[in-house]
Amino acid sequence: MITIYSKEGCPKCKVLKMKLEQKGLEYAECLDTAEMLKMGLKSLPVMLCADGQLMKFEEAVKYVNNL
């Protein structure tokens, strides 16, 4: 399962979610700021893949585009 760490109204977050939906990929969205801070996330969006790999926006978009 893919998890997207994002915040409401974030334009990049919307783009990443749209790309996932266009590919028909299911994902969960985490809006919990406290959890993100515990993970050390400092910029959003961040995508967590099923294999445990964290990807920042640019890397996540490339990954999704190549699926």
Image (cartoon, rainbow, N blue to C red):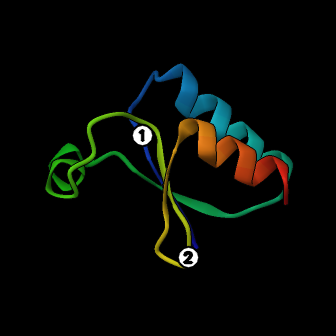
Three-letter amino acid code at disc 2?
Ala
Mark 1 residue element: loop
Label 2: few (<14), some or many (≥20) within 10 Å? few
In the rendered view, does 29 fall on the left or right side of 12?
Answer: left
Vertically, is 28 above or below 34?
A: below
Residue 30: x, y in percent? 38, 53
Q: Position of residue 25 (x, y in %)?
A: 75, 61
Left or right of residue 40, residue 52 in this image:
right
Q: Which residue is mark 1?
A: 6
Residue 43: quarter of image: top left
Q: Name the residue: 85% across, 60% down.
A: 67
* Kind of element beneath mark 2: loop
For marks 2 and 1, the one nearer the N-term is 1
Taking the spot 66% from the left edge, 30% from the top edge, the residue there is 15
Residue indicated by mark 2: 50
Mark nearer the viewer, 2 or 1:
2
- Residue 26: x and y in percent read 68, 64
Residue 13, image quadrant: top right
